[in-house]
Image: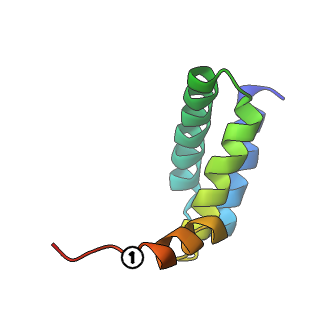
């Protein structure tokens, strides 16, 4: 898949979450770039990193944490300063 197709596919996810077209494309580019950075840092797969970032994005758009993070949050709630 070429980079433009990749941006288009990821931006569709953000459009489905309620973002405007221009905003969805910007977020898609940023997320793809961050996935590339994380893959390079971890010597891993860009696709896997993109999947993880998209999962966080989708749960965040719903005002939720990932289930694994929810469990951590319930065990260790934040303290008031």
Where does label 1 land, which residue? 77
- Residue at x 57%, y 42% (from the top left corner): 31
Which quadrant of the figure contains the C terminus? bottom left
Residue 2 in the figure: left or right of residue 72? right
Q: Within the image, what quadrant is residue 65 found in?
A: bottom right
Percent across and percent down for residue 43 are 66, 20
Check the image and report above or below for 1 versus 81: above
Is disc 1 surrounded by few (<14), some (14 to 19) or many (20+) residues within 10 Å?
few
Which quadrant of the figure contains the N terminus? top right
Percent across and percent down for residue 16 are 69, 67
Residue nearest the observer in this picture, 70 or 27: 70
Which SS class for mark 1? Answer: loop
Check the image and report above or below for 19 versus 45: below
- Residue at x 68%, y 42% (from the top left corner): 50
- Residue at x 79%, y 26% (from the top left corner): 2
Percent across and percent down for residue 28 are 60, 45
Tally of numbered tags: 1
* Colouring style: rainbow
Q: Residue furthest right?
A: 1
Residue 60 in the figure: left or right of residue 39? left
């Amino acid at each position: 898949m070429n980079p433009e197709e990749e941006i288009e596919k990821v931006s569709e996810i953000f459009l489905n979450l309620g973002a405007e077209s221009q905003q969805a494309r910007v977020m898609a580019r940023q997320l793809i770039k961050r996935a590339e950075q994380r893959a390079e840092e971890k010597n891993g797969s860009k696709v896997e990193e993109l999947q993880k970032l998209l999962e966080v994005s989708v749960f965040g758009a719903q005002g939720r944490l990932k289930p694994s993070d929810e469990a951590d949050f319930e065990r260790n709630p934040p303290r008031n300063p």
